[in-house]
Image (tube, helix red, strand yellow):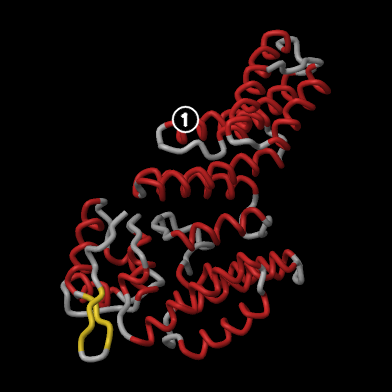
Amino acid sequence: MWYGACRVVKSGGERTMKVNTLGQFLRFYREKHSFQQDKVCSGICSLATLSRVENGSKIVDSLVAEALLGRIGQKVLQFELLLNDNDHYLWIIRERIQKYVEEGNYNEVKELLGIYRLKMPKGESVHEQFCLYYEAQMAIKKGNKTINEICEILYRALKLTKPEMDSGNEDAILYNPIEIDLIMMLIRYGYSVWHYRDAESELLKLFCYVEKVYSGTQREETGSRILLELISLVQHSEQYSRVIRYVDKAVDFISRGRGMDYIAELHFIKAKALEILYRENDRWTEQENFCKEECLMAYYVFDIFKQEKEKQEVQRFCEDKLGWQIIE
């Protein structure tokens, strides 16, 4: 995570950014990963704009800068990228929209989105994408739109910066965090543009990208969420051998980081998949012990994090499905 290198300074009554700092940072990490300029800026800004940003002769607003940095796996505080007073005002509204969506204050969100659209730069895709993204989030939480209506909003948002997504263009391999979220939500709600096999392939492609380009907590959090989405996808298709494979992949990925998020959940998912896959199989005697081991791992990690409800769910599964009780 890069903080402080791109500073906001006061000049002539406006907030301005040290222009060449962002440009140097963008160019360094783009070249480090051998990304072409047109792939980094596609759908976000013109190639000429990115070239001018990189050589220090152009500045862009904080949301555009964040979208560009996201494509190369980097993240900064939006506040550090503020361009001027209007950019600062929009940043404050974005922060409030995110907060109010989390709190469920939907009337305030609707009002703020209206204000944002009046004040945002015209013709810049990332700002309209931000609005559509939070419109979809609000609709999901309120439950006042059908799944198809929500997917249409999500799809419109994604197409603003990824117009090539449904063209089968394999060169379209760079993603920023909001694009990753949009793709995962579309897959989660079963949007028809991705059939099952394509959805699995898309999630694997996202994961490979995150594993290669992202770093630190952003890598751990985003990669884990993608793998959980992948596991959920194959669970719905009842392909339990693939569930086990992806759970093992997720546990290995998380174990290489610093956190323990999702570990207990993953072990319990694997236990249930083993029981379904082998219960009526002549290998059940052998696999039953592995199933119990996964239950124990889930149980004790839930215990560490004081997740009593989840602990009880594991215990009920052991008693009902395995005829076995975990004794502390």
Q: Is residue 238 above or below residue 170?
A: above
- The C terminus, quarter of image: top right
Image side of residue 78 versus residue 248, left or right: left
**Camera-nearest residue between 82 and 239:** 82
Residue sitting at x 70%, y 14%: 288
Question: In the image, is residue 90 above or below residue 205?
Answer: below
* Image quadrant in which the N terminus is located: bottom left
Quarter assignment of residue 306: top right
In this rendered view, identify the residue nearer to me: 20 or 18. Answer: 18
Q: Residue at x 57, y 81 (%)?
A: 113
Vertical position of residue 186 compared to residue 322: above or below: below
- Quick one: 122 or 269, which is closer to the camera? 269
- In the figure, is residue 141 to the left or right of 245? right
| Residue neighbourhood size for the residue with mark 1, other residues' Cα within 10 Å, grouped as few (<14), some (14–19), many (≥20) | few
Tell me residue 41's x, y (percent): 34, 68
Residue 24 screen position, x and y as percent: 18, 65
Q: Which residue is depicted at the point 68% across and 57% down?
A: 189
Residue 248 image offset from top left, x and y in percent: 54, 28
The residue labelled by disc 1 is 252
Helix or strand or loop: what does disc 1 sit on?
Answer: helix
Label 1 sits on what residue type? Asp
Q: Is residue 74 left or right of residue 275?
A: left
Q: Give the residue displayed 54% in from the left and 76% down from the top.
A: 131
Task: Establish if 221 lies above or below 129.
Answer: above
Q: Quadrant of residue 303?
A: top right
